[in-house]
Image: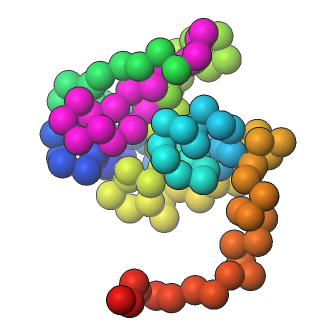
Amino acid sequence: MLTGRCHCGQVKYQMPEEAIHQAICHCEDCRRHSGAPFVGWALVQSSDLLIEGELKTYESSADGRRQFCPNCGTGLFYLNPVIFPNQTDVQIATLDNPDAIVPTAQIQTAERIDWVKQLNEMVAFERYSA
C-alpha cells in the first residue's frame, strides 16, 4: 500500500500501489481548487482507500465532490458518482512518495494554460535562490 497525507498531517491515507488509471488534469475546476496549473490524479476503488482523520467535502460541480483537510486545506480526493461510481481520485502529489504513481495521460487539455506546453523550455533551478 502507498501512504499519503495532507500538509499538516491531520489526514493520512493508504491506497493500492496500482491505480485504475492515472492522469494529469488541466481543467479549470482542478486549477481553481488547487491553485496549481494542473493536478495529478490516481483513480482507485473507494473501498481500497483507507483514510484516517476528518475530511471536509466541497461540492465543486453538479456531481463533483472535492475532499480536503479542514485544518490546512490540502486537497486530497475527488468523487463523482456519475463518472466514477464507487471510485475515488487521489491527488498524486499528496503521496509520501509521489514518484510511486506516474501519470500516463493528460486530460482536459482543451482547458490547459498555454504556457504549460513550454515548461521543458523554461530555465530551471534545482533550488530557489534569492
Q: Is residue 23 left or right of residue 101?
A: right
Looking at the image, the residue that sits furthest to the right is 110
Q: How is the image coloured?
A: rainbow
- The verdict on residue 76 being magenta is yes
Q: Is residue 127 left or right of residue 52?
A: right
Q: Is residue 127 above or below residue 95?
A: below
- The verdict on residue 79 being magenta is no
**Residue in the image at 58% along x and 86% along y:** 124
Q: Which stretch did the figure color magenta? A: 61-77
Depth check, front residue: 81 or 31: 31
Residue 25, how many percent across, how many down?
Answer: 66, 44
Residue 9, how many percent across, how many down?
Answer: 18, 47
Q: Is residue 39 above or below residue 52?
A: below
Q: Is residue 107 above or below residue 64?
A: below
Q: Is residue 108 left or right of residue 79?
A: right
Asked whether the viewer can see residue 13, the reply is no
Depth check, front residue: 55 or 101: 55
Dividing the image into 4 quarters, which one contains the C terminus? bottom left
Depth check, front residue: 45 or 98: 98
Q: How many marks?
A: 0
Q: Quadrant of residue 12?
A: top left
